Image (cartoon, rainbow, N blue to C red):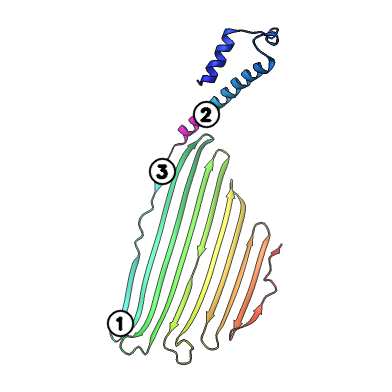
């Protein structure tokens, strides 16, 4: 109890009052009375709020009930032949699955959360190297990266499940030397970015969104590039755009390269 609360209690105990006499107390004005009562109510209110907050902090406990996350263990595979001229492939793969789950006790009840993910990575390099005269230095790199994750949150008012899928395959082909190239080599690249997200609330689909971005580019004469981008979601937003170029000149821009609402 604070000093202010103790003082108020002493005042009320020294001079008991009734509903007929408190307005006529000579030692209290009406303003003093309401100040005392107001201070008492405020003090009591703050005390209750503090006690509630303290109990909430004490109940905000929880635990991790499952954790299968481990350190990555990539697998490297080499299949190379030759010494002065080296040809073959070098591969790297990593496939990981894990789940982390737990709960927390809050002032609004227990909240359960779990995250399950799958990561699939692979990279293959195909090489043709002249390690003596450097007449040929060709390298083709193909990378595939996929990630899928699902999070689930459950509490008193229901369950929300969010699923996301991500993919980023890319291929880069480097050829060296190329006598007709301005830089002495050629590079050809292909990329395909994909992303999907879905959110369910109490087993009902609440929202979703999808993005696709496909790009190709090469400086093999005549150089060219193209891109196809599309995106849409549950709110009716739709975006689609295709562009292309050849010989460093823009050759195509689709009419859809503006946000649309459907």
Is 56 colored magenta in this rendering? yes
Where residue 129 appears, x then y in whole percent? 35, 84
Which mark, residue 197? none
Give the class, few, some or many, for how many residues have Cα within 10 Å of label 1's Cα (few <14, many ≥20): few
Where residue 237 appears, x then y in whole percent? 67, 61
User: Gap between marks 1 and 3, in whole Å?
Assistant: 50 Å
The mark nearer the N terminus, 1 or 3, is 3
User: Gap between marks 3 and 2, in whole Å?
Assistant: 31 Å
Where residue 41 appears, x then y in whole percent? 60, 21
Determine whether, in the image, residue 10 is placed left or right of residue 179. right
Residue beneath the point at 60% across and 81% down: 245
Where residue 112 appears, x then y in whole percent? 49, 42
The mark nearer the N terminus, 2 or 1, is 2
The mark nearer the N terminus, 3 or 2, is 2
| SS at badge 1 | strand
| SS at badge 3 | strand
In the picture of the structure, the residue carrying the numbered disc 2 is 50
Mark 2 or 1, closer to the camera? 2
Mark 3 or 2, closer to the camera? 2
Q: Which residues are magenta?
A: 52-63
- Using the image as rendered, state which of residue 160 and residue 240 is in the foreground: 240
Residue beneath the point at 50% across and 40% down: 111
Where 170 sits versus 44, above or below? below
Judged by its main secondary structure, the magenta piece is: helix
Where 232 sits versus 89, above or below? above
Which mark, residue 65? 3
Q: Quadrant of the C terminus?
A: bottom right
Most extreme residue toward the left is 83
Which mark, residue 81? 1
| SS at badge 2 | helix
Determine whether, in the image, residue 241 is placed left or right of residue 182. right
Give the class, few, some or many, for how many residues have Cα within 10 Å of label 3's Cα (few <14, many ≥20): few
């Amino acid at each position: 109890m604070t000093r202010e609360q103790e003082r108020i209690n002493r005042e009320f105990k020294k001079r008991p009052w009734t509903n007929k006499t408190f307005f006529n107390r000579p030692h209290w004005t009406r303003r003093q009375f309401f100040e005392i009562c107001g201070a008492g109510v405020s003090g009591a209110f703050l005390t209750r709020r503090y006690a509630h907050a303290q109990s909430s902090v004490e109940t905000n406990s929880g635990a991790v009930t499952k954790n299968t996350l481990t350190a990555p263990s990539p697998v490297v595979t080499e299949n190379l032949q030759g010494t002065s001229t080296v040809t073959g492939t070098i591969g790297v793969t990593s496939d990981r699955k894990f789940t982390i789950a737990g709960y927390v006790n809050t002032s609004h009840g227990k909240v359960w959360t779990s995250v399950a993910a799958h990561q699939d990575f692979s990279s293959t390099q195909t090489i043709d190297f002249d390690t003596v005269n450097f007449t040929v230095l060709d390298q083709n790199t193909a990378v595939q990266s996929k990630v899928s994750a699902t999070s689930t949150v459950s509490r008193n008012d229901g369950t929300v499940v969010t699923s996301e899928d991500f993919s980023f395959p890319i291929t880069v082909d480097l050829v060296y030397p190329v006598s007709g190239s301005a830089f002495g080599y050629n590079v050809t690249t292909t990329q395909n970015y994909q992303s999907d997200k879905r959110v369910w609330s109490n087993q009902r689909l609440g929202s979703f969104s999808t993005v696709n971005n496909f790009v190709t580019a090469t400086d093999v004469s005549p150089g060219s590039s193209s891109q196809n981008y599309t995106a849409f979601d549950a709110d009716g937003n739709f975006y689609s755009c295709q562009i292309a170029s050849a010989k460093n000149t823009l050759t195509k821009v689709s009419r859809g390269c503006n946000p649309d609402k459907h």
